[in-house]
Image: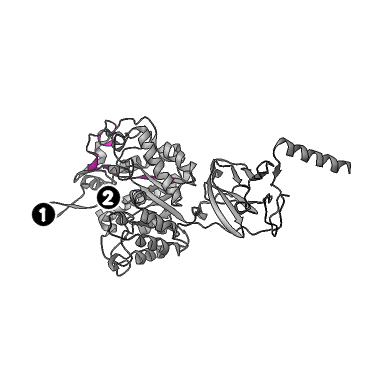
Amino acid sequence: MFLRDILITLLLCALLIGAVRLSAQETTPTVAVPPVPREFRAVWVATVDNIDWPSRRGLSVDQQKAELIRILDKAVQLHLNAVILQVRPACDAFYRSSIEPWSIYLTGHQGEDPSYDPLAFAIEEAHKRGLQLHAWFNPFRAYHPSAHGPLAPNHVAHTHPEWVRHYGDMLWLDPGDPQARAYSLSVILDVVRRYDIDGVAIDDYFYPYPISDKNGHEIPFPDQTTYHRYRQQGGTLDLADWRRQNINDFVEKLYEEVKAIKPWVLVGISPFGIWRPGHPEQIQGFDAYNEISCDSRLWLRKGWLDYLSPQLYWPIEKKAQCYSVLLNWWLDQCNSDAPRYVWPSLYTGRVGDGAWPASEIVHQIEIAEKNPTSDGCVQFSMKTLMANQTLSDALLNGPYAQPVLVPSCPWLGGSQPDKPSVEVETPPSDHSVTLRWYEGSSSQANLVQVWVLQMRLQGAWQTRILPADCHTITFASDAKQLPDVVAISAVNNYNLQGVPAVIYTPQRVADKNEPSHGTR
């Protein structure tokens, strides 16, 4: 009796001071928490020619930051979970680099310091919003004609002109030169080491797309000297096979080296959407295998990537390049011994230019969602999503109605994050309920990326994805806004979800017909 009286007195004192804090760590759940859906919902944010961001070169730092924040806020509003930001359009940098010059698309002058680090800012702001940030690199393009400006003294065309080839109105690193491939790889790995990116992505610019002279004759890519050197050193492959082998070597080394540094960083490749005409039989069009030396089917089968995002930039009803037929063909190429994701890139810009209805993109997403190895899409590009409210409404009223988690990659390993510890605060003054949670032990290889907050409200479960730096939520006193059960779990940088802490919230203003669950 004496002990009970002491406990009652202590509880009354706490109420008089202001709030009751109850530990929910030992709560024993008696309810099944539903799994959270997984789907990769990403968007390409192109910087070359100022397509998506910044809107024009020469904007002030504050203007550039404000534009990027609007992009990230829009991504959150649309329930996207990843942004793929172009950080190296043409051997230049949207980040502080000791290897390559600042991009001309920032200030209007290649090599000019923009007075901040755009990639560091993008990562910080994306993670604040629970978004992944994947860094998008063009591995071999060295100059784009939209630059309209001189190259900086430390551009590779000046420091190593022997690696660079003129082709039409562009410059290219020669993929046939082993030193040029190693250089490009070193640029990407430098970013992986120094920045907290969630993924590395490269697109379809391997060998350049062929161009023709005024008579319509295809102009050969000028790598004769490099190929001749290869043959003099005992190489036996013909020109086409040698070019493909150069790209294969680069892709394989890229995957190996990224994983050696940070195994949780995803590696994605977005090739041309057709591997070869006739695959499958009804498909016609550009032969990426021959023309740009891109054997993307091999990379998928070998597991030299975590996700392939083929550019399926055609409508469902176009038989010769049918979106759904091509997607199913790509899915059939996956190797069961090295499973990987196929997350198609969609030509969202066709809605923006009025060529397609918004329903085309919605249907393409829904087709991908039906397959467990294609539960995701990447939209090109952000400009249309920012401007087209009809498309935004169609996505939010359809396939993007609820937030989802990025799929995990079982082949990467990793361990589940710990269950968080949770405290419940119930201030007597306003009858609200506040939850505070704390993560368990962590390391660089097991950092919390987002929190999953699941709430049972009037018998239905709702889900919110919260950024890693969020550790509290308050529910108002209105019974309609106060869930009876809350589950909080961590998702780490391997995209693995931990066991949830399940809390029965005190029903401060509960319906009389509902039992009140105290915290135990």
Instruction: Give the mark nearer the N terminus: 2 vs 1.
Output: 2
| Numbered disc 1: secondary structure | loop
- The x and y percentages for residue 430 are 65, 43
Q: What residue is shown with label 2?
A: 207
Q: Position of residue 68 (x, y in %)?
A: 39, 41
Assign the N terminus to one quadrant of the image.
Answer: top right
| Circle 2: element type | loop
Q: Which amino acid does label 2 sit on?
A: Tyr
User: Magenta stretch: residue 152 in it?
Assistant: yes
Q: What segment is highlighted magenta in the picture? A: 133-157
User: Residue 147: in sight, yes or no?
Assistant: yes
Q: How many labels does the image show?
A: 2
Category of crowding for the residue at label 2, using alpha-carbon neighbours closer than 10 angstroms: few (below 14), some (14–19), many (at least 20): many
Residue 155 occupies quadrant: top left
Say if 354 sits above or below 423 in the image.
below
Amino acid bearing label 1: Asn
Name the residue carrying label 1: 215
Q: Which residue reaches farthest right? A: 1
